[in-house]
Image (spheres, grey):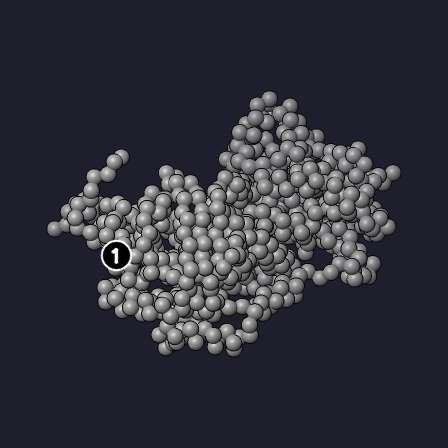
């Protein structure tokens, strides 16, 4: 269970988010400058909130983060090979056990044949799998993905989205996916739309489509009809 | 980790030997003009005191004095004039000084004498003159000589010479090397230095009535760790054998009271 | 037929190149060409050479060790913590590079000499650093530190922050993140900076002469030995100088293998 209740002012952005995930995947969508990356940085501890707390399974997070994080460009360690990357998060175990666990996860994600390769020699899709394996090998309590498919070509994107969808349903981790691509909604149980630092609407894509709370939501969910006039 | 340990081992292996268990060391600070004389006397001292290592530091007397004032580890100080010795004695940094040698400033020119000088009075004809800086003993002596010469050759003598000075060096050997390299047409150094340069330079004597006598005092440095050894070195300098060696090197004996 | 302007531009480049490259090459060539082999061999037997070589190797290794260990930590802090304090520290680390070495020597003497700021306090604890071998290490570390620290800061800054964030989420402590991610990725820049720093400390003269003195075996480094030898035996000085030139060339050669983008930090190739 991932509980996020944070407030932070930064630049012209006034962010206040209240979000809980219990073994479900939530897509956080929003236009540029809406606060998606600020939210991510708060979750990662790179930024300190002005107020509020983030808790995983009831444990409030400070320095110790049991969140698995896959950034937009996957951030594989270039000086380690695939196996080295996957093993990085394991410590306190003897080497053989670390290799075994890392290899198991790489296999599960379809990257088991890449063990000795250097990250620079991998395709985008392969890198994504390795990054995921590296994150998951620590049995995290929650998963954060930042624009998981943005740097892939359409075919790889389609393939990986299907795989990821299956994995997320299988693992039942609280997972937060930050994305601006509405097609990614298929991965999520719920979509939370963030605009100007606030969640303006939450729900399934159908719910959003039926009653969009803003132009952006409408565009995101594919509503075609014009918005009704709203009182200012 | 292994590489780090190997690096540390390498550094330790290269380090200078520990001093505690080594030979006794005597550090002698001496004016540059004493180089050859003290190298010989130093070797002799080491022979007569087995287990002793004599380290010679040669520089302008003014530099050595400054270093001693700042705590440099000297045991004996031999200067080329009394100015710097007196300063140390007044400050309580050096023990009672004795004159152990005398020296004679001379004019030197490169072997081929490009400026064609034949006497001190010809000096303003040289195009490039090198002398010691004023705080260096030889430099101070030079200025006194130029003043004396001005009384004979005319009041403009010193200034016309100084107008042709291209460098004021920080010790007498630096002055000498400029001439032996042919970089200067003329310079004032000690007779002993000119001798050590051999064929590279020609000596032009300075008339005795215009010349000064350089007096070399020696003293034990107050803060020495080897007071007995230091005194024995001073004794060697003042002994008949030491005086003989200095005379052989071209010095005149220091007058003993 | 070529355009006259293009010709003049080409000629200007050729002239400038020949002039400057020639100027840089000629003194080194003169050192080599004006010494006969027999004189070189004799010069090598000069009693100043071996103690100076040994001392220089020891002191430059020591100062390099100090500068690299402390400088890496400082550079990491500055690179990863932008802010006013870091900017001030960065400026401070650049100071020795713009201070003339002789001035640095005077400064060291005024700080740590017998009459210096800390002189009394140090003396009371039985420590008198001036005119000792540690003084040589201090002088060398002082003048060479900026070269390493600047390169290290640049190299650490180039490390992708995402990698460090990911490392933290994977459970690495800040120290482990530095050791296992930051250091390896910055390594080429650190090595190049270390080499420049070492070269600078090997050639250090003015500060050493003033603060450490010029005593054979104790504080007379190779540059000081060359200077001293010139007073008595030019050929010996030349031989010593050639030894140093050989060391410098070897260093340059090693550097070019390890940092192909160039020796100075600005020309660093981007880390993988």
Query: Number of numbered discs present?
Result: 1
Q: Residue C8 in the image: x percent, y percent?
A: 22, 45
Q: Residue furthest left?
A: C1
Q: Residue A42 in the image: x percent, y percent?
A: 44, 50
Observer-nearest residue: C177 or C21? C177
Parent chain of label 1? A
Mark 1 nearby-residue class (10 Å; few <14, some 14–19, many ≥20): few
| Vertical comparison of B102 with A143: above or below | above
Q: Can residue A3 be seen in this view?
A: yes
| Vertical comparison of B162 with B9: above or below | above
Residue drawn 77% across and 36% down? B88
Residue drawn 36% across and 45% down? A198
Residue drawn 51% across and 68% down? A90
Observer-nearest residue: B116 or B220? B220
Q: Mark 1 points at which residue?
A: A206
- Say whether residue A225 is left or right of residue B148: left
Q: Which picture quadrant has residue C68?
A: bottom right
- Say whether residue B107 is left or right of residue A54: right
Mark 1: which secondary structure? Answer: helix
Q: Can residue B199 be seen in this view?
A: no
Observer-nearest residue: C244 or B144? C244
- Say whether residue B247 is left or right of residue B120: right
Observer-nearest residue: C249 or A42? A42
Indicate the quadrant containing the C terminus of chain C: top left, top right, bottom left or bottom right: bottom left
Q: Residue A131 in the image: x percent, y percent?
A: 39, 65
Residue drawn 77% across and 55% down? B25
- Say whether residue C243 is left or right of residue A184: right
Q: Residue C197 in the image: x percent, y percent?
A: 52, 53
């Amino acid at each position: 269970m991932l509980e996020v209740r944070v407030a932070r002012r930064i630049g012209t952005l006034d962010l206040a988010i209240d979000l809980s995930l219990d073994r479900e995947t939530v897509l956080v969508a929003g236009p540029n400058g809406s606060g998606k990356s600020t939210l991510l940085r708060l979750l990662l501890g790179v930024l300190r909130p002005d107020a509020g707390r983030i808790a995983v399974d009831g444990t409030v997070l400070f320095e110790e983060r049991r969140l698995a994080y896959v950034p937009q460009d996957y951030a594989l360690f270039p000086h380690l090979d695939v196996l080295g990357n996957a093993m990085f998060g394991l410590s306190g175990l003897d080497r053989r056990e670390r290799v075994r666990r890392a290899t198991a996860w790489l296999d599960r994600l379809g990257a088991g044949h890449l063990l000795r390769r250097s990250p620079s020699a991998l395709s985008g899709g392969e890198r994504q799998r390795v990054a995921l394996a590296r994150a998951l090998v620590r049995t995290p309590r929650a998963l954060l993905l930042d624009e998981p498919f943005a740097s892939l070509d359409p075919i790889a994107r389609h393939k990986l989205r299907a795989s990821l969808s299956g994995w997320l349903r299988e693992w039942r981790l609280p997972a937060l996916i930050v994305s601006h691509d509405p097609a990614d909604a298929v991965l999520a149980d719920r979509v939370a739309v963030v605009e100007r630092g606030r969640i303006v609407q939450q729900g399934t894509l159908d719910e959003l489509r039926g009653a969009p709370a803003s132009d952006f939501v409408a565009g995101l969910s594919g509503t075609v009809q014009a918005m009704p006039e709203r009182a200012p | 980790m292994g590489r780090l340990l190997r690096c540390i081992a390498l550094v330790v292996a290269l380090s200078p030997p520990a001093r505690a268990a080594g030979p006794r060391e005597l550090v002698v600070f001496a004016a540059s003009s004493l180089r050859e004389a003290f190298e010989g006397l130093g070797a002799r001292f080491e022979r007569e005191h087995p287990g002793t290592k004599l380290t010679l530091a040669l520089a302008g007397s003014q530099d050595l004095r400054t270093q001693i004032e700042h705590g440099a580890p000297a045991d004996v100080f031999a200067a080329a004039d009394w100015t710097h010795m007196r300063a140390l004695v007044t400050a309580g940094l050096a023990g009672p000084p004795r004159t152990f040698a005398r020296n004679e400033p001379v004019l030197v020119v490169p072997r081929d004498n490009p400026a064609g000088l034949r006497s001190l009075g010809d000096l303003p004809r040289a195009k490039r003159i090198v002398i010691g800086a004023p705080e260096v003993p030889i430099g101070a002596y030079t200025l006194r000589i130029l003043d004396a010469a001005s009384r004979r050759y005319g009041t403009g003598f010193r200034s016309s010479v100084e107008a042709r000075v291209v460098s004021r060096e920080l010790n007498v050997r630096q002055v000498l090397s400029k001439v032996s390299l042919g970089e200067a047409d003329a310079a004032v150094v000690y007779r002993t230095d000119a001798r050590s340069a051999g064929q590279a330079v020609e000596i032009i004597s300075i008339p005795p009535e215009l010349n000064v006598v350089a007096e070399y005092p020696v003293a034990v440095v107050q803060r020495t760790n080897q007071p007995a050894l230091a005194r024995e070195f001073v004794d060697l300098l003042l002994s008949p054998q030491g005086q003989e060696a200095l005379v052989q090197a071209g010095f005149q004996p220091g007058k003993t009271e | 037929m070529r355009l006259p302007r293009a010709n003049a531009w080409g000629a200007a480049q050729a002239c400038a190149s020949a002039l400057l490259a020639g100027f840089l090459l000629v003194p080194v060539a003169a050192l080599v060409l004006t010494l006969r082999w027999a004189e070189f061999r004799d010069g090598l037997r000069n009693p100043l050479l071996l103690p100076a070589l040994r001392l220089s190797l020891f002191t430059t290794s020591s100062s390099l060790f100090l500068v690299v260990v402390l400088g890496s930590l400082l550079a990491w802090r500055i690179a990863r913590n932008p802010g006013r304090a870091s900017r001030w520290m960065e400026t401070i680390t650049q100071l020795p590079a713009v201070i003339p070495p002789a001035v640095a020597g005077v400064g060291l003497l005024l700080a740590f000499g017998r009459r210096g700021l800390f002189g009394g306090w140090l003396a009371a604890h039985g420590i008198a650093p001036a005119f000792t071998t540690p003084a040589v290490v201090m002088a060398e570390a002082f003048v060479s530190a900026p070269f390493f620290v600047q390169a290290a800061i640049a190299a650490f800054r180039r490390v992708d922050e995402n990698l460090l964030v990911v490392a933290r989420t994977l459970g690495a402590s800040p120290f482990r993140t530095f050791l296992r991610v930051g250091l390896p990725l910055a390594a080429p820049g650190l090595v190049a900076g270390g080499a420049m720093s070492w070269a600078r400390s090997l050639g250090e003269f003015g500060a050493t002469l003033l603060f450490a003195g010029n005593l054979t075996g104790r504080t007379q480094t190779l540059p000081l030995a060359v200077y001293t030898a010139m007073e008595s035996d030019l050929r010996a000085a030349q031989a010593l100088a050639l030894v140093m030139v050989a060391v410098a060339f070897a260093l340059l050669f090693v550097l070019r293998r390890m940092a192909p983008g160039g020796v100075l930090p600005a020309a660093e190739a981007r880390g993988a």
